[in-house]
Image (spheres, rainbow, N blue to C red):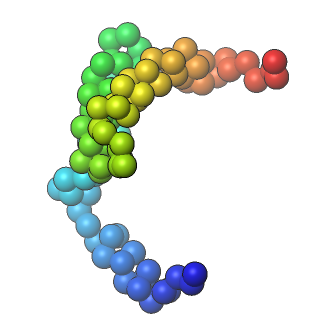
């Protein structure tokens, strides 16, 4: 299968012109909130922010219909569980103390 290069260029130029401040499916809002939260010495998976992180991510992903072909609620639970499991490692990554030894 070959990519139509002219068609790709055209679609990419259209994408670049989009105003991500007003585009409803943008990840920009979540990313801005993440940066504001994490510049205060906190992070998006700490105990104070993890529920809000889940809510913000799940709303964006629901709009993107990322759950297809499964039910949104089935994968939303997986997202919530995964965020909980990532918390400690995310803290280590942010602090630069990740233990990379192979078990």
The residue depicted at 31 percent of the width and 76 percent of the height is 14
Q: Position of residue 89 (x, y in %)?
A: 58, 19
Outermost residue on the front side: it is: 70
How far across and how far down the image is residue 2, in percent?
57, 84
Q: Is residue 22 above or below residue 37?
A: below
With respect to residue 9, does 72 lie above or below? above
* Residue pictured at 26% horizontal, 57% vertical: 20
Residue under the point 38% across and 10% down: 47
Quadrant (top left, top right, bottom left, bottom right) of the C terminus? top right
In this orientation, which residue lies closer to the viewer: 97 or 86? Answer: 86
Horizontal and vertical percent position of residue 62: 26, 43
* Above or below, 32 relative to 55: below
The answer to whether residue 44 is left or right of residue 24 is right
Q: Position of residue 99 (x, y in %)?
A: 73, 18
Report which quarter residue 102 is drawn in.
top right
Placement of the N terminus among the 4 image quadrants: bottom right
Indicate the quadrant where residue 38 lies: top left
Between 19 and 5, which is closer to the camera in this rendering? 5
């Amino acid at each position: 299968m070959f990519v139509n290069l002219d068609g790709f260029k055209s679609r990419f130029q259209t994408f670049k012109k989009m105003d991500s401040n007003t585009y409803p499916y943008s990840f920009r809002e979540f990313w801005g909130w993440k940066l504001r939260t994490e510049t205060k010495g906190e992070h998006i998976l700490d105990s104070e922010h993890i529920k809000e992180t889940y809510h913000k991510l799940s709303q964006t992903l629901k709009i993107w219909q990322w759950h297809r072909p499964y039910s949104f609620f089935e994968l939303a639970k997986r997202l919530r569980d995964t965020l909980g499991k990532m918390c400690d490692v995310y803290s280590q990554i942010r602090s630069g103390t990740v233990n990379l030894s192979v078990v």
